[in-house]
Image (tube, rainbow, N blue to C red):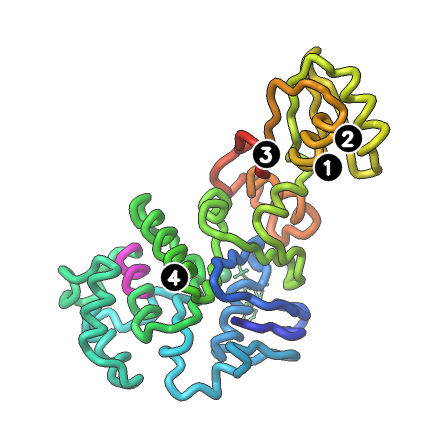
Amino acid sequence: MITLRELTKRYGDTVAVDGLTLDIKAGQVTGFLGPNGAGKSTTMRMILDLDHPSEGEALIDGRPYSSMRHPIREVGALLDAKALHPARSARSHLVAQARSNRIPLRRVDEVLETVGLAKVARRSAGAFSLGMYQRLGVASALLGDPEVLIFDEPVNGLDPDGVRWVRELVRSLAAEGRTVFLSSHLMSEMQLTADHLVIIGRGKLLADTPMADLLANSSLSSVRVRTPDVADLRTLIDRLLKDDDVTVESPAADEVVVKGRSAEQVGDLAHRLGLRLHELRTVSASLEQAYMELTAQSVEYETGHTVFGGTGSKETQGAEA
Ligand code: ADP
Ligand code: MG
């Protein structure tokens, strides 16, 4: 687990990270989202003792990174993939790291195999593509077989196969019970990868929430019902479910759209009162939509064009949100 307590970083007048307090738990992938300049990389650097907090602290399993004897056996990180000597080969880079952390050399070949660089391991890294650098960065993060993994924008520069590979890798690391903390600005990819989200804007915490809850709470998520009993259902919802945060519409003669209540709640109500439902489904907002609603107030840099991939709603049949 990673624990942040009032973590704050100021650069002159800029407050890059502003009083973050949260736990990043083991056994799940926690996605770290925020506009450019929100403070994601600065937060990660402070966790790894590459930057000193102005206030507060970051702990890994209760201890500061600086107190660890062999830190890469406890925390693996990929921050700046290109931060290595271009004349070195991938293998010699990893061998040096393994030696200084008392990691057996066979582990170097294991991780080179895992990240798909075994065949080019002896070439100098200067000739690597960005995607190969990212793979080497992942190899270096995995080298010490750590329980905690921190990846800053790991899919940058990867082709679609590489993106999918990172997704499957981080999901399997979390499934083994490890703590995985991963930033990305690619919404559609994050929606597929993360279980939990930490969202910041201008250094401040905007959300610390399960992905499913964020999507369900979006104003763009709704429960859609097809029923021959539209009028009765609307009356009942008005009487029994209606609240300030619930809206009900009928876009078609046989359709009722409810926002602010789950499919379970609407279905159970209809069942209790003997109304016929011919279809009951949740239409979930995309992460991009939910994120945009949340961060509308705190975009530091207006880009004038969308930088996020994927639009439109994701539909899930049945009752789950
Ligand atoms: P993100 O990774 O979310 O894009 P960063 O953590 O890189 O954001 O940056 C957060 C803020 O801190 C930005 O305003 C950035 O300009 C500023 N910043 C980051 N590093 C430094 C630094 N070394 N010196 C001065 N300002 C910095
Ligand atoms: Mg960054």
Label located before the other in sequence (1 or 4): 4
Q: Residues within 10 Å of mark 4 (few under 14, many from 20)?
A: many
- The secondary structure type at the circle numbered 4 is helix
Secondary structure mainly formed by the magenta segment = helix
Gap in Å between the C-alphas at discs 2 and 3? 19 Å
Q: Residues within 10 Å of mark 2 (few under 14, many from 20)?
A: some
The residue beneath circle 4 is 173
Q: Residue at x 65, y 56 (%)?
A: 207
Gap in Å between the C-alphas at discs 4 and 3? 29 Å
Question: Does mark 1 have its CB less than 8 Å from ligand 1?
Answer: no
- The secondary structure type at the circle numbered 1 is loop
- The secondary structure type at the circle numbered 2 is strand
- The secondary structure type at the circle numbered 3 is loop
State the image coordinates of residue 103 (x, y, percent, origin top left).
Answer: 26, 81
Label located before the other in sequence (2 or 3): 2
The residue beneath circle 1 is 260
Residue 247 is labelled as 2
Span colored in magenta:
131-137
Label located before the other in sequence (2 or 4): 4
Mark 3–mark 1 contact, CB under 8 Å?
A: no
Question: Does mark 3 have its CB less than 8 Å from ligand 1?
Answer: no
